[in-house]
């Protein structure tokens, strides 16, 4: 069975400074080895509501992700503010070492901050396959909406990338654990750290939970290390077949 090593960076994102953030990430991960490297939501700029200033118009973040994935011979993922066809999107990229990439556009926009006023919501759920694993891509506020993340026996793990502030950090941890338990899946939520351009504080708060709700991540020097064990997950699901009793939902726009 396939095991995956995942490493995420608790990144203190430099506000609206793409190249500086790229350099910080490269330095932090220089000696690290993993199957997947994970970066926070809007890792290149911070969670910024001025997309006209910061949005990628020439695939700057995607191109950097491709270069870094090739250099590390690993998948690299994180979300970025982009402009496409006159619309701004909060796009979560997952880039493989050969440059192949998948993406998910954040569906649930954070109206409390005005994200819904400047960004366009995505519509499609993205589950992609990597090294024998089926992985659901999600972004920050999506975490509050369990119906959209419902496991229909079609994924093994969820990746959440976020800028989730200290004032609501208990909800972040609680909901991550809940998503793991209710979906019988690994759930990794990677949050940023530091203080952003809006003076919001982000403590170290990245976690990975197993399907039983236990924590399976550890942090050293701002790098969050995890190993996903597919055989362990499948044995757990065979013993506790709770997904067979799930409710069925139809998601409408």
Image (cartoon, helix red, strand yellow):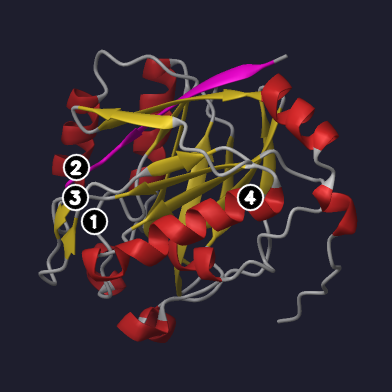
Q: Earlier in the sequence, mark 1 or mark 4?
A: 1
Question: Which residue is at 41% across, 56% downward?
Answer: 173
Is residue 139 visible from the viewing direction of this image?
Answer: no
Question: Which residue is at 89% across, 52% downward?
Answer: 244
Up the image or down, 140 lies above or below 74; here it is below
Circle nearer the viewer, 3 or 1? 3
Please, what secondary structure does the residue beneath circle 1 have? loop
Dot 4 corresponds to which residue?
181
Q: Which mark is residue 45?
A: 1
Dot 3 corresponds to which residue?
13
Q: Earlier in the sequence, mark 1 or mark 2?
A: 2
Q: Kindly check if marks 3 and 1 are in contact, taking CB atoms under 8 A apart as contact.
A: yes
Q: Kindly check if marks 1 and 2 are in contact, taking CB atoms under 8 A apart as contact.
A: yes
- Report if residue 4 lies within the magenta region: yes
Residue 218's spot in the image, x, y percent? 34, 29
- Report if residue 21 lies within the magenta region: no
Q: Earlier in the sequence, mark 2 or mark 4?
A: 2
65 and 205: which is toward the camera: 205
Please, what secondary structure does the residue beneath circle 3 have? loop
Circle nearer the viewer, 2 or 4? 4
Dot 2 corresponds to which residue?
21
Q: In whole angstroms, how far apart are the C-alphas of marks 1 and 4?
A: 32 Å
Q: Earlier in the sequence, mark 3 or mark 1?
A: 3
Question: Which residue is at 68% across, 59% downward?
Answer: 125
Please, what secondary structure does the residue beneath circle 4 have? helix
215 and 30: which is toward the camera: 215
């Amino acid at each position: 069975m396939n095991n995956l090593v995942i490493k995420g960076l608790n990144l203190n994102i430099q506000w609206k400074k793409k190249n500086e953030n790229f350099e910080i990430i490269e330095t932090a991960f220089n000696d690290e080895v993993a199957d997947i490297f994970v970066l926070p939501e809007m890792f290149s700029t911070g969670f910024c509501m001025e997309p006209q200033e910061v949005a990628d118009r020439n695939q700057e973040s995607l191109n950097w992700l491709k270069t870094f994935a090739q250099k590390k011979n690993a998948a690299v993922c994180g979300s970025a503010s982009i402009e496409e066809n006159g619309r701004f999107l909060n796009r979560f990229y997952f880039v493989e070492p050969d440059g192949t990439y998948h993406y998910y556009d954040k569906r649930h926009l954070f109206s409390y901050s005005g994200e819904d006023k400047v960004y366009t919501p995505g519509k499609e759920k993205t589950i992609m396959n990597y090294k024998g694993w089926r992985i659901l891509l999600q972004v920050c506020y999506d975490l509050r909406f369990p119906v959209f993340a419902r496991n229909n026996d079609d994924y093994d793990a969820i990746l959440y990338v976020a800028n989730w502030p200290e004032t609501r950090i208990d909800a972040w941890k609680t909901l991550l654990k809940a998503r793991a338990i209710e979906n019988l899946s690994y759930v990794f939520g990677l949050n940023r750290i530091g203080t952003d351009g809006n003076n919001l504080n982000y403590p170290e708060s990245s976690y990975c939970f197993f399907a039983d709700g236990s924590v399976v991540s550890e942090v050293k020097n701002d790098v969050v290390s995890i190993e996903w064990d597919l055989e362990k997950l499948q044995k757990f699901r065979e013993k506790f077949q709770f997904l067979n009793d799930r409710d069925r939902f139809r998601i409408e726009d």
